[in-house]
Image: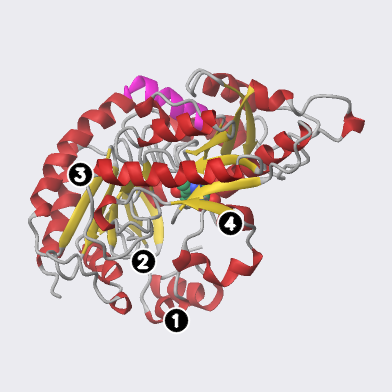
Amino acid sequence: MTYTTAELRRLDQQHIWHPFTPMSLWLESEPVVIRAAEGMHLIDSDGNRYLDGVSSLWCNVHGHRVPEIDAAIREQLGKVAHSTMLGLTSEPAIVLADRLMKLVPGNLKKVFYSDSGATATEIAFKLVVQYWYNKGRPERNELVGFAEGYHGDTVGAMSVGRTTAFHRPYFPLLFKVHYAPSPYAYRFEGSGVRGQGSGRSDEGVTEYCLGKLEGILREHRRTIAAVAIEPVVQGAAGMIVQPAGFLREVRRLATQYDVLLIADEVATGFGRTGRMFACEHEGVQPDLMCVAKGLSGGYLPLAATFATQQVFDAFLGEASTGRTFFHGHTYTGNAMGCAAALASLDLFEKNDLVREVERKAGVLSGMLEGLKGLKHVGEVRQKGFMVGIELVADKATKRPFDAARRVGHEVCAGIRRRGVILRPLGDVIVVMPPLAMGEEDLRVMIDAVGAELRELRA
Ligand SMILES: *Cc1c(COP(=O)(O)O)cnc(C)c1O
């Protein structure tokens, strides 16, 4: 089975429809075909090596072909690859649950497995609605989300995390959600949605957004089931880092108005922000918490939704009472995914990885300083190993580039020619290295970004 690069490209373009990809452009391009990987590098079909600067879409943790994770998967393969969690249980799923319980915020006591971020969030949204239903409050079935939040691409996830640029055609399918403004200080104009606003202080933005959130909760407290938030960093919206204290206040308001709090840690979980979970930055205990991307170290599709004992208990009772949570996916709690996750957690411990991320994030900050003065860098946002570099046509007015130019893609294509794989969010260049990336590779990556941005012309 050896295909030439030309054959692989031709067959790809003949058969494959790629996610989040304008296919007209793809069909005219010469896609990079990945054939192998080693550590922090992806290797294409011609043997070219690229630094994996977006952690294979935000999930890779320890790099590729990590001996310990490879071995754990092989060992699991020698026992069983997959068996169902419907009516049966499995050793790796049990051991992983026990291990996760020691890491997550202490009030979370139960884990419901699934296989992707969107399933983890859909499960949380269904759980909170049924929680109130089971408690005899079926009218409490509405959710509160944040403007331009992102929770995945299934219908429920799109409803709560409505990204206009992605989801507009599906608006007729989506259920009603209350949206609070998100604290996007750089482009804050009071409406709480992204615009060309002149920005405000963190305090002003926090106060405004929390005021709006409280207004929603006050007005609709009888019908709201839960508030859903991407804690500390709103990822897909462009790496919007919330002002310190914001999450804590959201938790306080949820408690005050007696609604549940869902923390979507799909992007931020597993060390990404310099804590095991972003909620720890603010000492926040959510009622439900969703994880996926980094859970298996970036190896296999595995996700989890955690719940408190209080939420779980509302689902107990005779089967005939209909309190059961009727939800599941074929590959829920997949054994190989759980084995990979266990090996990944061993490596977190062995390498003191979360603390290392915090330390290296400081080094990375220093490197990013050098980009801030560049002509088209509007803002650099960072929390741990989550970085967004927002590009603007005019720095003084914050005027964006013409969207049709797709400047983020243009810049990332140039960075790729320099041997680094990045993927933008609009005009925000995302830097999301595997947590294990060392300082030397970080330097190579940021140098490539800097070199490319220096060549960018309005
Ligand atoms: C990526 C992401 C999701 C969706 O995860 P998938 O595995 O792609 O379905 C959900 N929430 C957040 C915050 C994410 O970043």
Q: Residue at x 37, y 59 (%)?
A: 191
Q: Which mark is residue 24?
A: 1
Query: In the image, residue 352 lies at what x, y percent?
Result: 32, 22
Mark 2 vs mark 4, CA separation in Å: 33 Å
Taking the image as shown, residue 52 lies to the left or right of residue 25, namely: left
Sequence-first tag of 3 and 4: 4
**Is 116 in front, or is 243?**
243
Q: Is residue 287 magenta?
A: no
Label 2 neighbour load within 10 Å: few <14, some 14-19, many 20+: some
Residue type (three-letter) at the residue carrying disc 2: Val
Q: Nearer the viewer, mark 3 or mark 2?
A: 3
Mark 3 vs mark 2, CA separation in Å: 21 Å
Q: Nearer the viewer, mark 1 or mark 4?
A: 4
How many numbered dots are placed on residues in this image?
4
Query: SS at mark 3?
Result: helix
Mark 1 vs mark 4, CA separation in Å: 28 Å
Label 4 neighbour load within 10 Å: few <14, some 14-19, many 20+: many
Query: In the image, residue 51 lies at what x, y percent?
Result: 27, 51
Q: Which stretch appears magenta? A: 341-352
Q: Nearer the viewer, mark 1 or mark 3?
A: 1
Disc 2 marks which residue?
A: 32
Q: Which mark is residue 441?
A: 3
Residue type (three-letter) at the residue carrying disc 1: Ser
Sequence-first tag of 1 and 4: 1
Disc 4 marks which residue?
A: 159
Q: Which mark is residue 160?
A: none
Sequence-first tag of 2 and 1: 1
The C terminus lies in quadrant: bottom left
